[in-house]
Image: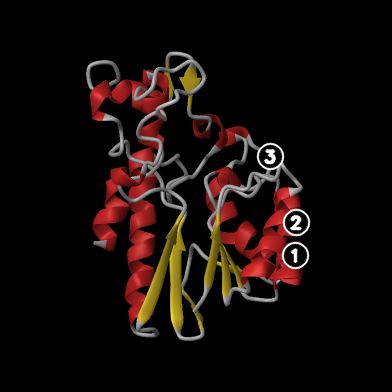
Amino acid sequence: MRLVFSSDLHIEYHLEVVGLVAARARELAPDVLVLAGDLCPDLRRLERALRLLVKEVKAPVLYLPGNHELWCGGAGGAGPNSRERYQETIPALVKRSGALSLGLRPRVVDGVGFVGVTGWYDYSLRDPSLEDLAGPVDYASRRFGEVRCVDGSQVYWPGDDGSALSDRDLSATMCGLLERQLDEVEARSGRVVVVTHMLPARPLILAAEVPAEGLGGVAPGKRPPEEKFLDAYLGAEGLGDLLA
């Protein structure tokens, strides 16, 4: 099976990327195109993009939401909350577009099982060099110096009692959802592809050091503490433990 994979297109900033990805995917002639989230928080624009990709690629398109698709304006948002987006609104729009949704249940294509979750973060991927500068309160507030993780004001995922889940609880919820999918797909397919938006292990953080030529005035081989702080919001070791 030939897979073509893409993620983080952020078409709210670069609408032309949809056509470019469609053209490149046609050249690669995949059996399956996998999109692992952060296409666009605007769900109408997201649906249009998926419709175009389904039309142009001529292969099954599997789509998994990213954290940006869960942006709902926070607890005071007028539309569906993040949980409703993930469980109801997004799967419905993906179905209308002709694509296949990932995130809740397995999909089997030509005998290969596909499972996935957006995942979340529990600060386990934080940079250890910041231990003396940032503590639990800083990570929970999603603020450090002049930087912040915007999810705090945009994502509202209520638990069964209606109160917002903490980052750690949401991360555990995602791991539990993935575990159930893996248990289900093992009975249906001998080969399994797992897709997550968030990273499952710290070694996968690619921007571990600034290139030798430097970057934006930053000395080679060094990253500013503010950039290192954001590592905490890239994923969770629990995802990796589950896959292992």
Residue 175 % position (x, y): 34, 56
For the residue labelled by badge 1, is the local secondary structure a helix, a strand or a loop?
helix
Badge 2 amino acid: Gly
Badge 1 amino acid: Arg
Q: State the image quarter where residue 166 is shown.
A: top left
Q: Earlier in the sequence, mark 2 or mark 1?
A: 2
Q: Earlier in the sequence, mark 1 or mark 3?
A: 1
Spatial CA distance of label 2 from label 1 is 11 Å
Report the front residue among 92 and 128: 128
Which residue is at 57% across, 43% downward? 68
Residue 203 % position (x, y): 30, 45
Q: Residues within 10 Å of mark 1 (few under 14, many from 20)?
A: some
Q: How many marks?
A: 3
Q: Which residue is mark 3?
A: 78
Q: Earlier in the sequence, mark 2 or mark 3?
A: 2
Tell us which disc is closer to us: 2 or 1. Answer: 2
Q: Quadrant of the C terminus?
A: bottom left
Residue 77 lies left or right of residue 7; in this view the side is right
Badge 3 amino acid: Ala
Q: Residues within 10 Å of mark 2 (few under 14, many from 20)?
A: some
Which residue is at 52% across, 40% downward? 156
Which residue is at 60% across, 60% downward? 88
Q: Which residue is mark 1?
A: 51
The label shown at residue 19 is 2
Give above or below for 116 relative to 32: above
Q: State the image quarter where residue 188 is shown.
A: bottom left
The label shown at residue 119 is none
